[in-house]
Amino acid sequence: MAAPKQTEKGERRRALLVAAAAELLAESGFDAIRHRAVAERAGVPLAATTYYFSSLEDLVSAALDRLAHTELADAHDCLARRDDPAEIVLDLLLGPRSRTDGLDAVLGRFERLIGSGRRPFLAGLLRAQRVEFDALLDEALTRATGRRPGPGEVRRLTALVDGVVLTALIEADPDPRAVGRKALHEVLESLPRV
């Protein structure tokens, strides 16, 4: 089915649906994105979800893209405000909601990342987002150390923080962000500085 011609009202309605789906994704994961739930959250008729999106996969993709762009915008704002680079790295790896919502936000983030692997239609979108996230991680690490990270350094740091946080989740640590922060600070202290 061809995409409907977008009017101003149609663009607003589609944006409401994407925002509602992104909220549901952030709060409860992929399984929460259902036509009826998204329409109810957006305050629009149920038929709008199938009118503006060719499939549930299309809606899920739009929600994930919106959520990632919101998180990237938050990280850009933190960089512009000169926030602590380590906290920016944690926001990028664990999601900015992990600052305020703690364990639930971190669990949701990891569930979303792992759940993405079961949705091959998201692979291209996730690869593109990873490039943007890595560029911001590179910038935050540059600010933290005074030098550009070497080849593979961003990915190694990501793997380390992801690993210690996942272990903290397995061990039911109530503050996985604090565990990630500790590991990150240890690594940052060991990196050469300019």
Image: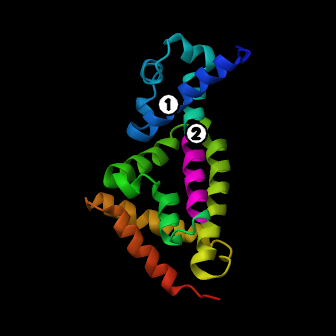
Give the position of the N terminus as an image quadrant. top right
Of 121 and 104, the residue lying toward us: 104
Q: Secondary structure at mark 1?
A: helix
Give the colour scheme shown.
rainbow
Q: Which residue is mark 1?
A: 21
Magenta highlight range: 65-79
Q: Residue at x 40, y 68 (%)?
A: 180
**Which residue is tagged 2?**
66
Which one is earlier in the sequence, the residue at label 2 or at label 1? 1
Look at label 2 and name its amino acid. Answer: Arg
Decide whether residue 76 is among the magenta residues: yes
Locate residue 97, reporting x and y percent: 42, 51
Look at label 1 and name its amino acid: Ala
Residue contact at pointers 2 and 1, CB within 8 angstroms: yes
**Which corner quadrant of the image does residue 137 belong to?**
bottom right
**Going 49% across and 13% down the picture, which residue do you hit?**
46
Percent position of residue 106, x then y: 38, 53
- Identify the image quadrant of residue 29: top left
The crowding category of the residue bearing disc 1, from other C-alpha atoms within 10 Å (few below 14, some 14 to 19, many at least 20), is many
Between 129 and 7, the residue placed more toward the observer is 7
Measuring from the top left, give residue 161's x and y in whole percent: 46, 67
Is residue 107 positioned above or below 24 on the image?
below
